[in-house]
Structure formats: C-alpha cells, structure tokens
Amino acid sequence: MLVLSRKVGESIRIGDDIVVMVTSIEGDKVRIGIEGPREVPIHREELYQKIKRENLQAASIGLDDAELVLKKLK
C-alpha cells in the first residue's frame, strides 16, 4: 500500500486518467473528489462489498430460478 500525505487542494494521480483530490478536512473526516473516465466504476468499499455479494448470490441461483425471476420482471 502506498501512503501519501496531502493538504486540502492537493491531489494524486492514478495512471493517466484518474485524479484524487483532497477537498476538505473537518475533524476526523476527509472529503475527497475523484475525477476519472465514466466507464471506471467508483464505489465506497462497503457498497462495493454489497454489490459483490449480491452478484455472487445471483450467479449461484439455478437457471430455472433465473427464468422465473425474469418472467416476473416482464
């Protein structure tokens, strides 16, 4: 893991396309802004983990169950 110190208004760059900037610091909270291509998904860690669990759960249902779900959605 790379650990960097940044002040408000300073940023770091990830590759050519992603910029992470510290926008404010209030107490023990740091607000950051992220600029990057729209096709690169950006999620909070807890939301990413939830999406991952739901995708794994959806992938584990049988084809018959999946067809029933699709029929209900129509």
Image (cartoon, rainbow, N blue to C red):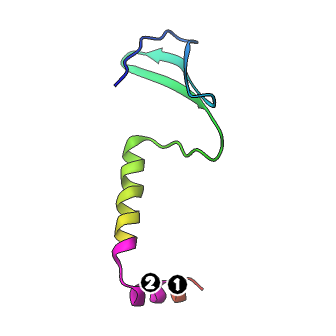
Tell me, yes or no, whether the highlighted magenta stretch contains residue 62. Answer: yes
Q: Can you name the residue that lies furthest to the right here?
A: 38
> What amino acid is at disc 2?
Ala
How many numbered tags mark residues here?
A: 2
Crowd band around label 1 with a 10 angstrom C-alpha radius: few (<14), some (14–19), many (20+): few
Gap in angstroms between the C-alphas marked 1 and 2: 6 Å
Q: Can you name the residue that lies furthest to the front here?
A: 15
Q: Are marks 1 and 2 in contact (CB under 8 Å)?
A: yes
What span is in magenta? 59-69
Tell me, yes or no, whether the highlighted magenta stretch contains residue 23. Answer: no
Quarter of the image holding residue 58?
Answer: bottom left
Crowd band around label 2 with a 10 angstrom C-alpha radius: few (<14), some (14–19), many (20+): some
Front residue of 21/3: it is 3
User: Residue at 47% across / 11% down in the picture?
Assistant: 6
Quarter of the image holding residue 1?
Answer: top left
Residue position marked by numbered label 1 in the rendering? 70
- Residue 23 sits above or below residue 72 on the image: above
